[in-house]
Amino acid sequence: MRLLRDLGRRKLRSALTITGITIGIMALVVFGSMANKIDALVKGGSTYYQDKVTVSAKGGYMGLGGVLSTKMADQIEALDGVALAVPTVDMLQSDDSGAVNMGVPPMIDGFVGGATAGYETFKLSYATGRGLTAADEGQNVVVLGSDLAHQFNARVGDTVTLRAVKFQVVGILEPTLTAPDNAAEVPLAAAQQLFMKTLPSIVADKLSGGEIATGIVAYPKAGVDPQKIADEINASISGVTPMTGKDFDKQIGSATSMLNAILIGIGLISLLVGGLSVINTTAMSVAERTREIGIKRAIGASRWRIRREIVAESAFIGLVGGLLGLALGYAITTLGNDAGRESATILFDLTFGTAFSSVAFATILGALAGFIPAWGASRMDPVTALRYE
Amino acid sequence: MAILEGRNLRKTYRLSRKNTVEALKGVEVSIEKGEMVAIMGPSGSGKSTLMHILGLLHAPDPNHGPAPELYLSGENVATLSDNARTRIRARRMGFVFQDFNLVPTLTALENVLLASTYAGIRGKQARQAGLEALTLVGLADRADHKPAELSGGEQQRVAIARALVNKPEIILADEPTGNLDSDRSAEVLALFRQFNREHGQTVVVVTHDSEVGEACDRVIRMRDGRIRDHGQNVAQVADAPATATPLVAVPV
């Protein structure tokens, strides 16, 4: 292949330029995968919270924070437009997890299995085993998210320890790319007991374990705007913060789209540098081959053909750099996810779209970078080019 | 019949804002079909410029005085676009330059085939023509060698094969023997002579080597951007071409 022979004339230079593109595409693939993962997390959350109102104690968020009473669920259910309200107990799996964590930290989610059947639209499917049922109340059983199951290396029937209490695994979820991947679902009563142990005894003594909730999830009747229910809750119940899907999108969505923009921006900047080095390399090889271009023009190569030769070469640099960058990026994201699995921290989601567009982008960038020197070369006077020393 | 006919050919090169060189000062020239012509003259006489215009590498200046005319087999080519001139160069002309100018990454055959590609000939047919051209210049066994693996004389013969591969009507050579010793020069000249005789190709050689001039049918002498002497075709005068030009046997 002539193109390879031409690139082989200056092996070190070609290799360095390809390396530049490789690094840029690697950055784009890695950061792009990270952005994909964040997107999936946020999209999952957005879908989950869309059709309901999640009530937390004042200052809390997403059903986390201070202590509520399960009785409040009845109070909210009695409100106009509310179809169902159920108590939940959510807490971190360990007090120090989540300190350095992107996305959602590993959680314990307590609820009465099946209580929201017919209302909850966020469908979970089970890789193995089954979901929680009302009959599980009083038992120490758990359904693990897919990442968490990896972390515990647990199968259905195994026993795992959550906050120093042993639970028997009855089901493992399919990956969702969002919060449930990192969650341990337990019966409400079991979660209440775990939560009690996290409270200072002076507080715990005053509470009845069976009445504890950290959040109330309210499902509107068909056709009722969740915002209306949130307003009602604000008006009639004090000491709580209701959150609708819109609130979630506003607060989490905007923050993450900013983060994504920064991540993609870093990738693009490194690519820009790579692209400039392609321009430089191509311009240099065009200068070295001035006489050759002159002779080709003299014996009948059209301007278009000269341009095409040069652009093909720089596009090839882009393609090779893109493929190498994708390979490196794939290695990094795979190794990163494997390493993160231990702590249930899955940072990357390398999609086909990201992989394909990165390589296509590198190739187009290479071609565009080559076009500048190619244009100049094709405009050279053949006689002048022939005499070039 | 004239294959190339030019009138009012002028060319001024602008070296800088104030410094211009009048390389051709209104030249009238005619080259007959099947002639082997040398254009001679001292450096700066305009002989290369004339060859570049005759070879459609440059267009004559269109302004300052009477309009230039240039006919290739009767067709006016003085004002053609760059693309049209490129097409004519590819299909109807062959070029040989002083510095051989082969592409270093390509083999001898690939260098020859460049000219075929530009003329729109590809595949088996092109390959066969390329090998034939290399055989004609005595380099069939060097087809797969890169220029660096060939001697100067061999490189120039590859360049000649490249100029011949499309069987062009005209071959234009700019100091083709300038970088060769006298034996290699004789070989190259003998090749031109052979194609001229056997295939009726018109050959225009720019040179300041008087031996090259003597080997040609006619010598056009230039000085200061003008033709001083159009010369006489010795072949026609003597009517005995074989003895008019002493030839060296081609060692192929």
Image (cartoon, coloured by chain):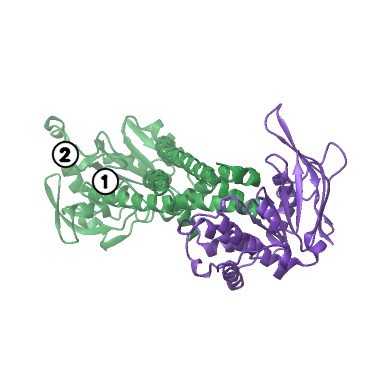
Chain colours: A green, B purple
Residue B167 seen in the current view: no
Q: Which residue is mark 1?
A: A345
Find the distance from the CA under tag 2 to the CA under tag 1: 27 Å
Q: Element under label 2?
A: helix
Quadrant that contains the C terminus of chain A:
top right
Name the disc covering residue A196, or none: 2
Residue A233 seen in the current view: yes
Kind of residue indicated by mark 1:
Thr
Q: Nearer the viewer, residue A56 or B105?
A: B105
Kind of residue indicated by mark 2:
Met
Q: Which percent across, then down, holds residue A129?
A: 24, 63
Q: Which percent across, then down, holds residue A244?
A: 41, 39
Q: Which percent across, then down, holds residue A55?
A: 34, 38
**Residue displayed at 24% across by 54% down:** A144
- Sequence-first disc among 2 and 1: 2
Q: With B114 as the anchor, is A167 left or right in this view?
A: left
| Disc nearest the viewer among 2 and 1 | 1
Q: With A299 as the anchor, is A54 left or right in this view?
A: left
